[in-house]
Image: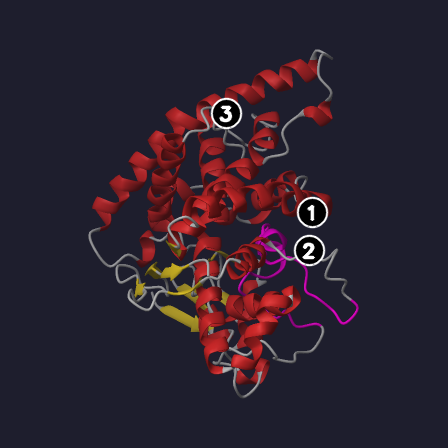
Amino acid sequence: MSTITVDGYKEAHQTLSLPELEQSLYDEGRILMDRVLVTLHGEEHRVRRLLEMKIFKKDFFNYYEKEVLPAVVNATLARFLPTGRTDLMDFGRRAMLDLTADFAGIDRPAGTEEERDALLSILNGLGVAATLGQYTGDREVMRAVAAKALSDFDSRFFRPSAERRRQLLAEVAAGRLAEDALPRDILTILVKNEGKAGLTPDMILRETGFYFLAGAHTSVHSLTHAMHEIFQWTAAHPEDAERVQKDPLFVQRCVHESFRLHPSSPIAQRRPTCPVHLPDGQSATPEDTVVIDLFHANRQPSAFGADAAAFNPYRELPPIQAPYGITFGVGIHTCLGRNLAAGDVSKASTDPATHQYGTVTLLALALIANGCRPDPDNAPQREARIKREAWAVYPVLLGA
């Protein structure tokens, strides 16, 4: 039994596409991650992915950017602008909370701050499950935290939301409601297909919780990394400070470059289902663990130039190469929410007025428009409890 690491960009890209390798990064977090889309393999993964892709359409992303996100951002900013300060991690969690709850299918009937705080607490607890494999402390203690969060999520939010969708689907079946009146969310699709493709109530619970977590948790970290890089870049290149204020396509380039340097998980981890020869010449057996080092692969000079380890929003790449590298995965295991988070890659002919920017860029633009800048009296702090690059707190000032 050995751990085999792949860190060359080309080799990592090819390794992620191998059908003989199944997901194993989230084995420690089974309390939430057991048999959710990201941990499925083979035919079961293909069937689940095809089912859920029904919601991931171009008009869906445009709807969320144009109709849902602006109100969410304004409401979140309204909470912090009077004080003139916020923490990027807290701002990101609160902004993404409503967006991803709508997307996952989690109803918030009360609409109160207490309800949102309860859901935020659940989000933080579920986040423990996704990072348990990289946790450096007592994992049993944190596993209990994740289990309580899932239980609270189930009783307070999931069950009522699922039951409402069952009633709506019954109305559609009886001809009393048009199908296009159904909520556009993951939970509606899952409930509609309950009993098919092996979907049990427990699996639907975990899948809904996973989508809620994945949409919010990863984007929060990505937003904070991107803002940090923008702060650093404009401090070193003051001539770009005005461009950041006026050019949203440039800000998106900054976000994509940050995605490349700071993948939400620094590694992908796979388990061979049979003996396999890897693209870099190594061999692996079912007893081995294959680690694809996304962090270092995305910083390979052979793929991204001599300054690959540095942040450079002016980086020139071949058209076939994604500016964010392999951060979102490859092939059938590409993150379904990539376009929602990152938007479309701009071209020379892109119209800024109609372009899809992605939620992370739009949140960054909203912060920039409101004078977001580092708090000189409160330094940001890195998260020390997990073996991945993350911020614990990042204080900033807002307004003039």
Return the x and y of residue 400 as percentages of the image width and height.
Answer: 46, 61
Q: Is residue 347 magenta?
A: yes
Return the x and y of residue 363 as percentages of the image width and height. 53, 55
Which residue corresponds to mark 3?
Answer: 161
CA separation, marks 1 and 2?
7 Å
Residue type, mark 1 in image? Asn
Q: CA distance from mark 1 to mark 3?
A: 24 Å
Which numbered disc, 2 or 3, marks the residue that appears first in the sequence?
3
Main SS of residues in magenta: loop
**Residue under numbered circle 2:** 356
129 left or right, relative to 55: left
Contact, mark 1 vs mark 2 (Cβ under 8 Å): yes
Alpha-carbon distance for marks 2 and 3? Answer: 30 Å
Given the image, on which type of amino acid does mark 2 rest?
A: Gln
Q: Earlier in the sequence, mark 1 or mark 2?
A: 1
Q: Which residues are magenta?
A: 320-349
Q: Picture coordinates of residue 398 (x, y %)? A: 43, 58
